[in-house]
Image: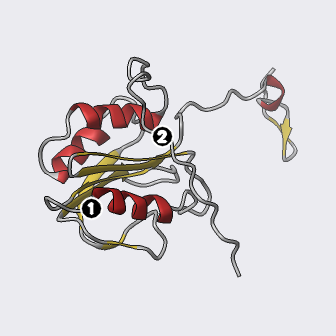
C-alpha cells in the first residue's frame, strides 16, 4: 500500500502591499505574466505562458477536456468550459500548468479548492514540484506545479574528476 501523498504547500498570491516586489520563483514569474495578460482562449493563454523567458525546456501547450489530468492522480477535473495544459514536451521536469475558463457565474473558489486539494506534487515518479499556485482573474483560473528555479546546484570540484569505475576522468 502506498503512503498518502502529503498536502501540497500552496504559494499564496501576493497581497496588495507585496505587489511592488518583483516575482522571484518560476511559478511567481509565470503567474505574473498570466495576471498581466489573461485574455483569449485557454490555449492562447497557455501558449503565451509556455513562451515565458524563464522556461528552460522545449515546451508546448494543448487543449484538455474534463476528466483525469496530469498532476491530479484519480481526481477528475470537471466544471470548466475550456481548458489547456502547458509544460515540457518530454523529460523528467516537475512542471505542469493549466489554464481553465469557467462558465460565467461558476463557483471559482470551489473549483480552485478542488484543484488545490487534489494536486499531487509527486505526480511524476522521480521528481517533485516545489511550488503550487492556483489563482484566478475573473472566471479564468491559473494552475501551476513547478520547481522554484531551473538553476542547477554547482557541483563541488572534488566531484568533477577522479576515478569512476576504474577510469581516470582526467579532471585536475
Q: Which residue occupies the extreme bottom position in the image?
A: 1
For the C terminus, the image quarter is top right
Residue 53's image quarter?
Answer: top left
Residue under the point 69% across and 76% down: 2
Q: Is residue 68 above or below residue 142?
A: below
Residue 73 or 36: which is nearer the viewer? 36
Query: Foreground residue, 150 or 168?
Result: 150
Residue, x 24% and y 70% (percent of image)? Answer: 65
Q: CA distance from mark 1 to mark 2?
A: 20 Å
Q: Quadrant of the N terminus?
A: bottom right
Between disc 1 and disc 2, the foreground one is: 1
For this view, does 8 lie left or right of residue 39?
right
- Which is more toward the observer, 17 or 45? 17
Residue 12, label in figure: 2
The residue positioned 49% from the left and 31% from the top of the image is 25
Binning the other alpha carbons within 10 Å of mark 2 as few (below 14), some (14 to 19) or many (20 upward) gives few
Q: Residue at x 21, y 46 (%)?
A: 138
Q: Disc 1 designates what residue? A: 107
Residue 115, image quadrant: bottom left
Q: Position of residue 41 (x, y in %)?
A: 13, 51
Q: Is residue 119 left or right of residue 162?
A: left
Is 138 drawn above or below residue 157 in the view shown? below
Using the image, determine if residue 170 lies above or below residue 133: above
Q: Residues within 10 Å of mark 1 (few under 14, many from 20)?
A: few
Residue 139, numbered circle: none
Q: Please give left or right for residue 9 compared with residue 139 in the image.
A: right
Q: Earlier in the sequence, mark 1 or mark 2?
A: 2
Label 1 close to label 2 by CB (< 8 Å): no
Secondary structure type for disc 2: loop
Location of residue 126 in the rendering, given as x and y in whole percent from the top left corner = 62, 58
Please provide percent x and percent y for residue 66.
Answer: 27, 72
- In what element is the residue under mark 1? loop
Amino acid at each position: 500500500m502506498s503512503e498518502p501523498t502529503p498536502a501540497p504547500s500552496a504559494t499564496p498570491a501576493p497581497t496588495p502591499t507585496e505587489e511592488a516586489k518583483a516575482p522571484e520563483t518560476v511559478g511567481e514569474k509565470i503567474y505574473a505574466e498570466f495576471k498581466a495578460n489573461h485574455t483569449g482562449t485557454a490555449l492562447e493563454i497557455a501558449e503565451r505562458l509556455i513562451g515565458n523567458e524563464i522556461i528552460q525546456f522545449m515546451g508546448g501547450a494543448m487543449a484538455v477536456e474534463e476528466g483525469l489530468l496530469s498532476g491530479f492522480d484519480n481526481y477528475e477535473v470537471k466544471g470548466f468550459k475550456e481548458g489547456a495544459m502547458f509544460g515540457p514536451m518530454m523529460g523528467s521536469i516537475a512542471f505542469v500548468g493549466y489554464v481553465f475558463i469557467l462558465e460565467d457565474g461558476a463557483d471559482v473558489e470551489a473549483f480552485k479548492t478542488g484543484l488545490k486539494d487534489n494536486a499531487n506534487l509527486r505526480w511524476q515518479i522521480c521528481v517533485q514540484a516545489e511550488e503550487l499556485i492556483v489563482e484566478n482573474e475573473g472566471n479564468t483560473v491559473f494552475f501551476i506545479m513547478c520547481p522554484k528555479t531551473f538553476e542547477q546546484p554547482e557541483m563541488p570540484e572534488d566531484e568533477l574528476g577522479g576515478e569512476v569505475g576504474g577510469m581516470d576522468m582526467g579532471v585536475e
